[in-house]
Amino acid sequence: MTGFSRASLHHRGPVRESLAARRRRRARRALIGYATAAITIYVGAWHLAHHPSFAVQAVEVEGNTVSSDEAVAAAARGAMASSALSLLPMTNAYLARTGVVEEAVADALPEAASATVSRQGQDLVVRVEERVRFGYWCRTEGEECFAVDPEGLIFAKENPPAGATRFGGLIAAPDPVRERYAPDEAWANLRAVIEVARGHGFSPAQVTSQDGIDFKIELAEGPYLLTDATHAGSQAIENLQVALDDESLSALRGYEYADLRLPHKVFLKALREETNSEPASEEAES
């Protein structure tokens, strides 16, 4: 009985090895088949995605006045660059992700506040929303000026139109494009004063500062304002209205300047009379 059992074991060993070998061969054949199928599908999908008949034909540009059509189109096409092995090439008009193109155009062009991309057939249409001009930063030497948007960002070299607000100082960079005239909080307070002055019929002509804190706002109507950009601009204007006892600020025309730099007090200096008398000045609590 023992001899029989040993013979059976010797017989089963080669059988088991043969079955295992066949299973391994079948597994290898199946793996090769799956890999071949996957490669075939990938190659077919790649050729379909990259087929010239689906490629972006043209990039149309709208809404731009400062940036050229060529610059906008170049930024858009730069965003379409894709890996040669990609199954989702941006050069395919139906696979191009418009959001990627929009971000690339806005990042590439400082004058672009935003961009919107749409598809018309196999053309991409890029509509640029350019930055609004709040004023102009100008160098102290010469007349070279650059447009400034409502957020204080300097974005394009331009000649200011007549009556535009000019900002001076603070920027030392040889190329000021993409620089900010003042930090966010300081700019917001300064802008509030300028906007209220404009809203009351005044024309801020020149804004200057040596340190980014104390600003001088010269009005085309004659007076000028001194303001501290670390203090709320709206509060500074309220203080001035109380000091003048004039909501419309029209009484300001009778003064040489108004110093708004104190949190709860306004210093007003009256215009010099035509006689040789000394100019009058007064302090008003707000």
Image (tube, rainbow, N blue to C red):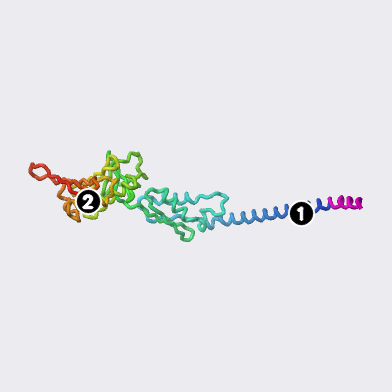
Furthest residue toward left:
275
The residue type indicated by label 1 comes to: Arg
Question: Left or right: where does residue 73 sit relative to residue 6?
Answer: left
Dot placed on the residue nearer the N-terminal end, 2 or 1: 1
x and y, in percent, of residue 278 in the image: 10, 42
Query: Which is more foreground, mark 2 or mark 1?
Result: 2
Query: Residue 10 lies in magenta, yes or no?
Result: yes
Q: Which residues are drawn in magenta?
A: 1-13
Of the numbered discs in the image, which one, if any, rests on residue 239?
2
Asked whether the viewer can see residue 190, the reply is: no
Question: Left or right: where does residue 241 sit relative to residue 16?
Answer: left
Q: Are marks 2 and 1 in contact (CB under 8 Å)?
A: no
Packing grade of label 2 (10 A; few <14, some 14-19, many >=20) is many
Question: Left or right: where does residue 9 sit relative to residue 217?
Answer: right
Packing grade of label 1 (10 A; few <14, some 14-19, many >=20) is few
The secondary element bearing badge 2 is classed as helix
Comparing 5 with 212, the one in front is: 5
Residue with the mark numbered 1: 23
Judged by its main secondary structure, the magenta piece is helix
